[in-house]
Amino acid sequence: MNAEASELALELALIPLIPLIGFIINGLGFGKLNKTVAGWLGTLAALGSFANTLHVVLEHWGQSLTVDYFSWISVGSLDIHFSFLLDPLSSIMLLVITGVGSLIHIYSMSYMHHDEGFGKFFAFLNLFLFSMLLLVMGSNYVVMFIGWEGVGLCSFLLIGFWNKVPAYNAAARKAFVMNRIGDLGFLLGIFILIALFGSVEFGVIFPQAAAVLTPNSGVAIALTMLLFVGAMGKSAQLPLYTWLPDAMAGPTPVSALIHAATMVTAGIYMVVRSNVLYVLAPTTLEFVAWIGLATALIGAAIGLFQNDIKKVLAYSTVSQLGLMFLALGVGAFSSGMFHVVTHAFFKALLFLGAGSVIHAMSDEQDIRKMGGLKGKLPVTFAVFLIATIAISGIPPFAGFFSKDEILSHVYEHSKLMWGLGLLVSFMTSFYMFRLVFLTFFGGFRGTDHQKHHLHESPWLMLGPLVVLAGLSIAGGLLGLPPVLSHNNWMADTLAPIFEQAKAVNASLFGHGSMTHETEWMLMAVSTVVALVAFAVAAFTFGGGKNVPAADGSPINPVQKLVYNKFYIDELYGAVIVTPIKAFGEYLYAVIEYLIIDLVVNIVGWSATMGGKALRRLQTGIVSFYVLLMVLSVVALALIGFTIKS
Amino acid sequence: MLAISALSVFGIIVLFLGFSNNKSALMLAAMLSLLATFGLALYEWQHPEITPAVAAGMMSFDNLSILFTAVLLVTGILLLPLSERFLVDPKAQPAEYYAILLFSMVGAIMMVTFDNLIMLFLGLEILSISLYVLTGSDKRNLLANEAALKYFLMGAFATGVLLYGVAMLYGAAGSFSLSDIALYVQDNHDNLSPMLYIGLFMMLVGMLFKLSVAPFHWWTADVYTGAPNFFTAYMSTIVKTAGFAALYKILSVSFVGVYDYWFLMLAICAVLTLCIGNLTATAQQSFKRMMAYSGVSHAGYMLIAVASFSDKTPEAIFFYSLAYSIATITAFAALMRVADTKGSADFAAFYGLAKTNPFLSFALTVSMLSLAGIPLTAGFMGKLFVFMSALEQGHVALVVAAVLMSAVGVYYYLRVVIAMYMREGNGVAVTLSPRFRVVLIATTVLTILLGVVPSLVAGAL
């Protein structure tokens, strides 16, 4: 390896290693290090990784480089290497993860300051960064899978961070189980890849994909479907989305980092990475589009009437992730990635802003007990409003551009989907402004104690908010639509990733036949929809009117259905959990107890008896031993003689 | 050759150092002897021409021999600090023990470097006679005396059988030299003298006895239990490494042509050994006696490697003996401390050890996991190499038997772990001296390191 290559290898390795070192120090030193040291250690690990990423990415911008570290698993003809891939796609993900991750670390130093598990929190956060970086840097599906499992573990640990509350532990378990279902699909997908290609390396699979897989053949569909099942679990898509709202049990910075900005987009990253496989399976793509759309609709609808500030944001995340999958499903891979990036900015901002509100409200999360906070929390209010405008798709903020790009691709694909997409857009804008009006406008509805305690958060928390607000405003510049600019930075940057897919189906990646007039029309329509939704929300909730009634008071049936999340959790409980549990109890009582235990006990018993019998031969008398030896020699000689002749 | 000559001289020097009253200098001298020998052995790495020039075809130091020599010496170096009790015991004779130990090491090294059956016999006897003496070294201990006498009586019997076999082989081939015998087998392949078969059979019986392979293992449990703990540790590691290296050498050099004949014998003995060793171990109440049967069962795994006779076999035997030796050293170190503190080597003596000495419990747990063959330990990789070597030759049945029996092994190895972590003890603390601590850290780190990165040593061949 020459000097330049080994320098790159070292620098790339340092990106995930720095957070890992942070994790090890904080993990081992938990309880011994004081909070300032632990907090700065964790934060500096994130910042260091960000600085290093920035350096590496800028130095090798636009290149596609694979660094092979060592042969890791070698079985038969399968040789899996531990290797990293640095290309535009992983570069963008790396920057988002370490950048947003660093901001959230800084924020957490203040937010978690009173928590007794402070050091543990930073250790987990660093471990998460490490796993997530592994996920996007791996140059094959197996390294990706390690990261995939790692982030799942960290998510579990952090959702159940306050493990003294049983409900939080249940939420953590739920997230873990749902993710495991998805992981199984992913794993089976990897096995199919190994069977088909004899490798898990991206650089081996993708160039051959078109030759090995017949377009839309059963194998291609099975493979992509299984990988998508993995994405469904990780990225909270129907039917595996119910864990994400429950995951709000974790501390708010966790919700911002893991359950909004980074981990939940892993599924999208994986599908984008495997784009050539998906392009070879149009049926799967159509399925992905519909699942994404349905998830977007359901998430947005449930979000309409939630009263917990984090729950609203959680359903909003589910819905926005659905939108991203809709983009992937219609073949707009780079638009999907674009939305991943802008969403990371404004959703992290929304969660951190919500954290600031919750902090001020002495851990109150119910928006019915808030109101009129804009005077007391002016900075939080301002940034929260910016994020709301961004997510609602009102120009010229970031969300408008990414969402518009998705919708224009959807429009080309199917008018019906586009219409439903607009509906999502309407609902999004509505529930977000409802949240803003109920939280920041009108009169204060909390207790006197809370009112007395109201305060703007310290600058350690506001700083990251302001940076994210800036990104939420300007993030749209990353992908300007064709009518405004000839260069869509995001699409141009990612273009090399899609070359193989382009060779299979060029039409998916063209600029389309859309005229400028149609484009202007589409932009105008989505803007109007967002503004109308804002107006409806302002009319209904402006000035703190129509505060939702307390739980238990009579509401109309539709509202009740929505408020109770369409009873989907209960449905899963009745249809899946209860029968499985009953089956499990049957297995335990009959199969396990009567059959398996019996067999195992008989085996164990015979081993013990055998041992006891053999032990009896051990008499301690030498002449007896010699006799046994002579007999053995004779017996062996006879056996040998018989076989010989 | 350099190593053997030097070590013999060192042994005499250590013996004479016994005249001085400074006992701790003795351990230091023995340690330096082993280290120097280790250096001399490595000096011949990639230089196989040094030894034959002076040894007249009686022995050769090829790379494989040097690797086995290294395993023997590393085992000795790691074990030596554990003998510190001899330094303070007024009735112990450390100069004699160390000198005999060094001499026995000369025998062991001869067993991995011989090119001639005479040298094999010499090495085996030097090692065995030293061990008879060391077993009975605690003169006031009746059990140890009994064990030494038993060992000697049965060992003499086995030596007789072995020598008889060697004589027969001479009768058939007209030479003691391994290469001459190989030539004879090759040239007369269709018309081999029956004496060759009888000779090979007898010689194998003698070897298998020394390796405590069933059905010739009867002496093992009694001798291992009766001998002082330190020497039990010594013989259960050194003899296995040297013996299996010797067995592989004879068979691979001289008797490739009659593979079918000896394969069957070794396969039968391997399965018997695995079953008897593992099953009997489950019925033991004493940790020390359990370790004796565990030693028997590990002979079974190594025998599978020899019997499978693939190109992976030398690597498998080498790695397995290293992994087994290191884990066994940990186990006996723990046993020595517990037995010295509590006066008993039963499982009950280990109750609650995790509370009073978490480090020792952790080290012993790692060693037990390694012996049981749990992944991420050297023992797992050792078993993997052995099984892969057997599967390469298509001996599926052998591997199935071995895997089933290693499942039985998990039961009795975990018993001591359960005793340490899940039972209440009587609160008597087991302490560790710095020497023990260093050895335990080294063995534990090595066990895990070799389990994670086996290529550190596995690729040395």
Image (cartoon, coloured by chain):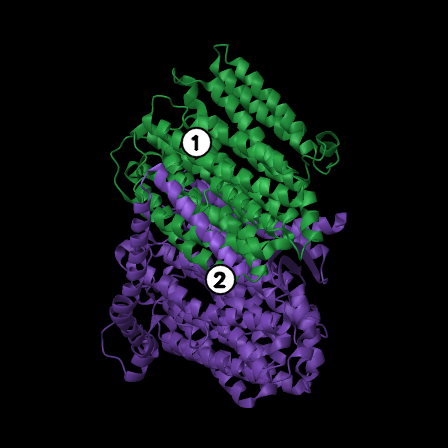
Element class at badge 1: helix
Q: Which chain is drawn using purple?
A: A
Is residue B101 positioned above or below A314 on the image? above
Instruction: Indicate which disc residue B152 carries.
Output: 1
In the rendering, at what x and y percent does residue A135 appear? Answer: 56, 61
Mark 2 vs mark 1: in front: 1
In the rendering, at what x and y percent does residue A492 appear? Answer: 70, 71
Amino acid marked by disc 1? Phe
Q: Which chain is drawn using green?
A: B
Q: Nearer the viewer, residue A430 or B393?
A: B393
Instruction: Indicate which disc residue B76 carries.
Output: none
Q: Nearer the viewer, residue B212 or A576?
A: B212
In the rendering, at what x and y percent does residue B404 appear? Answer: 42, 58
> Residue B345 is drawn in which quadrant?
top left
Q: Residues within 10 Å of mark 1 (few under 14, many from 20)?
A: many
Q: Going from the N terminus, do you reach mark 2 or mark 1 first?
A: 1
Q: Is residue B195 left or right of residue A642?
A: right
In the rendering, at what x and y percent does residue B90 appear? Answer: 38, 15
Q: Residues within 10 Å of mark 2 (few under 14, many from 20)?
A: few
Instruction: Indicate which disc residue B397 carries.
Output: 2
Q: Is residue A382 left or right of residue A247?
A: right
